Image: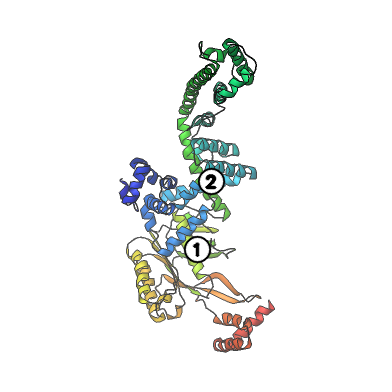
Amino acid sequence: MRLEEYWGVGPKTSERLRETLGEEAAVEAIESADVRALTDAGITRGRATRVLRRANDDAGMEALATRDAREVYDDLLSLASEYALTRHAADRIRVLTPLTARDAIESRLGAVGDARAAWASLADGGRSAVVAAFEDYDDATGSERAAVEAVLALRDAGLDGSTFDALGDIDPEAVREAADALQYVTDDGVAPGADDRLDDIRARLDDARDLENSAFDVLERIRETGVRDLADFRRAFTDYVDRETRLSRGAVESVAPEQAHDAADFVSTSLRALVDDLERQETEREREVEDALRASIAEAREDVDRAVTAVDDVAVELSLARFAEAHDLVRPTLGGDGLAVEGARSLFLDDPDPVTYAVGDHGLDGAPSGDRVAVLTGANSGGKTTLLETCCTVALLTAMGLPVPAERAEVGFFDAVVFHRRHASFNAGVLESTLKSIVPPLTDGGRTLMLVDEFEAITEPGRAADLLNGLVDLTVERGALGVYVTHLADDLSPLPPAARIDGIFAEGLTSDLDLRVDYQPRFGTVGKSTPEFIVSRLVANAGDRRERQGFEHLAAAVGEEAVQRTLAEAWED
């Protein structure tokens, strides 16, 4: 493909990539989801992420059918990337997309599960060693040497081919030898420590250069010894160099000129010749040593290349494993024609209450099976929107081949996930844009999951009930699945047989006057918003007498006896 054929790559971006990477390397970076290569080329991280998401699986991104679904997707990847072991792993996690092939989903679920088992098997010391290995690799910005050393550190910590195929394909002895060579081959030449002879030549060369830079001082010190003629000066100079530096008498004598105009000419000519000779020796020896080192690296080239790939792949898998462990995620069961969760939890709340819920066909206990649509009703602040978001989370994580926040889950395959949060804007424009967002996925012929919150918030209640009835009928007719949150259950026309009504109930107030809610929906039952609980709290918390009288007036309207009973039960607690 040409660069301009990728989504989001316009003329300016493609020109920048050609100038910095070249066409072929830029295409390879996009195809391999290499955020690091694109950002190094001057593309902003956000733009690179968007381009690579589309390049990875454009059809998968199309499954995110609404803005709210895309926001949940972004939030999930942002959360997962917090557990990344390297910057590059974080980048690769952020470009994960919903997958369009079941075998790809199964494969990633398996890889993350194996990585989690490997991570769990490591003792604290082993985990610390792995984290340190990736930190060192990160600090070295992914160099070949750092990759090889990281692979060796991972194996020493207890991770090998029995856990990660990428590590099993590498010959540890070959990369160990390559690591020794790689540490000495730099952009500036052969590093110190690679060869004793080369180090000795360099040390003597440093001494010769120091002498050359201080030739006048050397000349004066020798003259101070009382030499009588040039022959005496020659001997004194040789003795001085032999005594004061790492240079030998023979080295000096071999380059000293036979003839010189005077002592100053002798010193400058001798030192210049000495430096030239040692520079020649250094160049020759460095070439010999570098050729030998590069030959050693060449022998292990395939293993070195595997190490570079392996360390990045293992970093991603272990990062996802850490995410799964931190949030106690489980592998969902794929297949069927439904979405069912047991003990599901929100990933975006502290200490959430687990719930069991389902639509469609499934085999989990504790929730009805076979209903295409659930209309969810109940108390304000009762967790209805959170339940929709959790269902969206489970569907998207599964589509990306990642474990989910539940005790058990059965998840079908969806071509589109329509998640629509309640938006408190009441006008025709919002109604039109909402309908244009949520209806087309139902009519495209694919498998669609509808998760729509309080449709009545964007139009008058009576008409909202009519529209909601139409959406429920359309969802059933098109063979889709849906959960619709509403306070208009009593205004709905009889629902089709494949739909049910569920309810969430508030049960009173706590002793701190917080709303006490049973977040587990009751299936086949209309939930109640119970405004008397809210009014009871307002009465109890009134700041002055006049304010209290106003709330007491409302209490009489909603049922003063119920308000008083609520307050009495709260205070008894």
* Figure quadrant of the C terminus: bottom right
Residue at image x 39%, y 58%?
Answer: 63
Residue 82 position within the rendered picture, expressed as x and y whole percent measured from the top left: 53, 53
Instruction: Assess disc 1: are there few (<14), some (14-19) or many (≥20) residues with their C-alpha within 10 Å of its C-alpha.
Output: many
Disc 2: which residue: 115
Q: Is residue 163 above or below residue 478?
A: above
Q: Nearer the viewer, residue 313 or 418?
A: 313
Q: In which image quadrant can residue 229 be found? A: top right
Residue 301 position within the rendered picture, expressed as x and y whole percent measured from the top left: 45, 30
Q: Secondary structure at mark 1?
A: helix
Residue at image x 36%, y 67%?
Answer: 437
List the single residue furthest toward the right.
Answer: 572
Residue 461 position within the rendered picture, expressed as x and y whole percent measured from the top left: 41, 80
Q: Nearer the viewer, residue 346 or 499?
A: 346
Q: Secondary structure at mark 2?
A: helix
Disc 1: which residue: 390
Q: Is residue 508 left or right of residue 439?
A: right
Residue 563 position within the rendered picture, expressed as x and y whole percent measured from the top left: 60, 84
Residue type for callout 1 = Thr
Q: Is residue 258 above or below residue 436?
A: above
Q: Is residue 284 above or below residue 72?
A: above
Q: Which mark, residue 172?
A: none
Mark 1 or 2, nearer chain start: 2
* Figure quadrant of the N terminus: top left
Residue at image x 43%, y 58%?
Answer: 412
Marks 1 and 2 sit apart, C-alpha to C-alpha, by 25 Å
Residue type for callout 2 = Ala
